[in-house]
Each structure stands twice: as structure tokens, then as C-alpha cells.
Image (cartoon, rainbow, N blue to C red):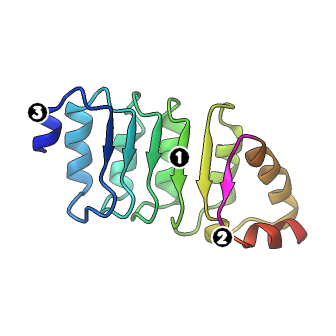
Amino acid sequence: AKIAKTCPNLKKLGLAWCTRISDKSVQVMKEYLDKLCDLDLSLTGVTDESCNLLSSMDSLVRLNLDATDTTDAGIQTIVRGNKSIQKLSIRFIGDLTMTTLKLLAQRDEKLSAILEMSKCADVPGVMADSILSQLTKRGTVMDSTKTNEMQLN
């Protein structure tokens, strides 16, 4: 909270592995850091409550939520609500669904994502081919061997 309150012009903030960072911390960031462009919350204690807040932080261009307690629903909230994000890292988020992949694919060309396909629960092979092709063209990185398995199914 002290950083947010004393550095309102902060543009980049890396908080990876800071286990005391929570949804309350994100609330403070939203309140005080309206110029924040690049935020790394990987391996922190944030949940879908933070996704609601992050979805309205229009200054964010890069967001890393790797290995957080966010869910598929939270990621959808961000993708639907925050049109300024261009780089979204969501590796090790449990059970991403076809709906989330479609939302990522349908977003404007500026968005690329880094995700782990082994965490995509309900993605059938035939449908996945089309979506994966769209995402790959935009620079999305699939971080898993399951990508190949899905394309072959």
C-alpha cells in the first residue's frame, strides 16, 4: 500500500512470488496507480475478486497472472472488460475452457496471451485447431505438449 500511495506515477510493478499480495492489495493499486502499464502478479494470492478490479484498470497493457488463484471465470472477466491489455500471461490457471479460448481469439489483434494448454479442460480437438490457429497467428504462446495432442485429435 505504501508504494501505491507514494508512487502514483509508477508504470511497471513486479510482485511475483510476493505471497502477501492479495485482492486487497490490487484494490489499493487500482485506487492509486492509474498510470500502471505493466503488472506482474504471478504466484501471488490474488483471486477472481482481483480480476474484477483488473478488468477496469484501463492503463494496463501487460498483465501476468501465472499460477494465481484466479479461475477461468476471472480470466473471462478480464478479457471481456479490459480492452487495453495487449499481453496476458495465464499459465497454470486451472481448467481454462473453450469459452475463454474463444474470447481470447475474438479479441482485437493487439492481444496476445501466454497460456498452458494442459490446463484447458473442455477443448475438443477439432474446435481447438481453429482457435489455436487464430491465437498462434497473433503471437499467443501455448506452453505445453498438449497443444500437439489437441491438434492431432
Amino acid type at circle 3 is Thr
Highlighted range, magenta: 138-143
Of circles 1 and 3, the one toward us is 3
Secondary structure predominantly adopted by residues drawn in magenta? loop
| Separation of residues labelled 2 and 1 (CA atoms) | 19 Å
Of circles 3 and 2, the one toward us is 3
- Position of residue 74 in the picture relative to residue 126 (left or right): left
Disc nearer the start of the sequence (1/3): 3
Q: Which mark is residue 88?
A: 1
Q: 121 and 19: which one is in front? A: 19
Q: In the structure shown, which secondary structural element does the residue marked by tag 3 occupy?
A: helix
Q: Which residue is drawn at 80% across and 59% down?
A: 128
| Separation of residues labelled 1 and 3 (CA atoms) | 27 Å
Q: Residue at x 25, y 65 (%)?
A: 19
Amino acid type at circle 2 is Ala
| Separation of residues labelled 3 and 2 (CA atoms) | 42 Å
Q: x and y percent of residue 9 in the render? A: 24, 26
Q: Name above or below for residue 127 compared with residue 34.
A: below
Name the residue tied to disc 2: 121
Amino acid type at circle 1 is Leu
Mark 3 surroundings within 10 Å by alpha-carbon count, few (fewer than 14), some (14 through 19), many (20 or more): few
Name the residue tied to disc 3: 6
- Position of residue 9 in the picture relative to residue 66 (left or right): left
Q: x and y percent of residue 102 in the render? A: 70, 48
Q: 29 and 73: which one is in front? A: 29
